[in-house]
Amino acid sequence: ATKSELPIDPLRIVAKEMKHLTGNIRQLLGSGHPSLDRVAKYYTQAEGKHVRPLIVLLMSRATSLCPKAPELPPSHTTATIDSSISPLGILADTNPSHSEFSSEPESPESDVLPSQRRLAEITELIHTASLLHDDVIDHSVSRRGSPSANYEFGNKMAVLAGDFLLGRASVALARLRNAEVVELVATVIANLVEGEFMQLKNTARDERNPKWSEDILTYYLQKTYLKTASLISKSCRAAALLGRADATTVDAAYSYGKNLGLAFQLVDDMLDYTKSGKDLGKPTGADLELGLATAPLLFAWKTTPDLGILVGRKFGQEGDVQRARELVYKSDGIEQTRVLAEDYSQQAIAALQTFPDSEAKDGLIEMAMNTLKRQK
Ligand code: FPP
Ligand code: MG
Ligand code: MG
């Protein structure tokens, strides 16, 4: 087979950078209080998919080959990770030092900066914090094939552990010494909460018998951006910024992340209808039970006006969930969701058009295609 026919494994492309991810995250989460330490590290035990760090690292490599931004005055340059000023020794950095790293006589493509590795860890920390809180809000009892943190330790501990993760993520973020990156990632944290609030409301106005309109889809997509795509898109942007990429590249990185994030969540909402809880390692069919109308239902509603009344009462009456599910299965809602996800995935790939060919770029393309194929 020619090179282009070989299967591409995105994980292999940044395996070196991914190797210490979980260890470094656990180090960032060290606490002198044994039970806080335990809850905080709980979701790092089961192997997550690490989708976000993987994307950040691939983006870091892929953009290292892109044009650089004009040099800024020295006061604006990004500090490399400095573990020497760690007050409690908890942020000790096990990454190779920058100088060690840049002396490696490898292809320039292998240059993922320590700050970009740290960004990958921060991204996973924020994601994990949001899962700790999400499982409380959703009354979820399982995550990654094990009991959820709230189930195991109770709501109070789970919420506090999530806050602790955000605190430690913020410390690590500040240490990157890049104000634009701090602003981006801080915005993500606010966006996650805004997305979750939009979701609690389902539609902009609370109505008893809402009518379908395009606004409903717009609201859903805005919510989906805030809840899922914001973290992926802004961390892609931050990765390009840390690598000193030029403005065109920074925007392209953002666009890739945004479209991939939207595709990713659309597939997530689809799997909630098509997969069993055993397959996913977390409860499925959960969205309707929680009163949530996601893409498959919204598309079904367009051609099945009767769904409006069920949406209006958040599937709260006896038999509503079952009835809604049947109407979704009878409609082309799941298929339309897949088509829309495919469209976003294509747009993600198109955003990479200006990037020079590289293994990392192929990895990003593969990630966009895998998003559609994923089964969990
Ligand atoms: C998973 O969605 C949840 C999110 C993507 C974001 C949740 C955000 C919050 C709870 C706001 C608080 C935020 C921070 C930063 C602590 P899901 O419930 O659809 O997915 P699931 O099936 O994996 O549970
Ligand atoms: Mg949930
Ligand atoms: Mg949720």
Image (cartoon, grey):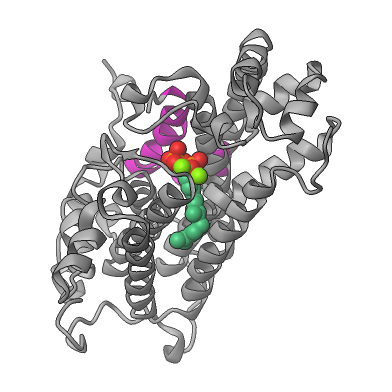
Q: How many numbered dots are placed on residues in this image?
A: 0
* Residue 115 falls left or right of residue 202: left
Depth order, front residue of 357/275: 275
Task: Kindly identify the residue that appears in the image at 33 percent across and 70 percent down.
Answer: 164
Q: Looking at the picture, how far across and down is residue 154, in whole percent? A: 32, 55
Task: Kindly identify the residue that appears in the image at 32 percent across and 73 percent down.
Answer: 168
Q: Is residue 246 visible?
A: no
Q: Looking at the picture, how far across and down is residue 53, in whole percent? A: 34, 52
Depth order, front residue of 205/30: 205
The quadrant of the picture occupied by the N terminus is: top left
* Residue 157 falls left or right of residue 42: right
Q: Looking at the picture, how far across and down is residue 303, in whole percent? A: 80, 16
Q: Is residue 9 visible?
A: yes
Would you identify the image quadrant in which residue 266 lies?
Answer: top right
Would you identify the image quadrant in which residue 60 lies?
Answer: bottom left
Q: Looking at the picture, how far across and down is residue 135, in whole percent? A: 41, 47
Examine the rendered structure and indicate whether residue 110 appears above or below residue 367: below
Q: Main secondary structure of the magenta part?
A: helix
* Residue 263 falls left or right of residue 143: right
Examine the rendered structure and indicate whether residue 275 appears above or below residue 259: above
Taking the view exactly as shown, the residue that stands out farthest to the top is: 330
Depth order, front residue of 353/374: 374
Task: Kindly identify the residue that appears in the image at 22 percent across and 53 percent down.
Answer: 42
Highlighted range, magenta:
348-373
* Residue 20 falls left or right of residue 176: left
Q: Is residue 355 magenta?
A: yes
Examine the rendered structure and indicate whether residue 2 appears above or below residue 231: above
Q: Is residue 240 magenta?
A: no
Taking the view exactly as shown, the residue that stands out farthest to the front is: 318
The quadrant of the picture occupied by the C terminus is: top left
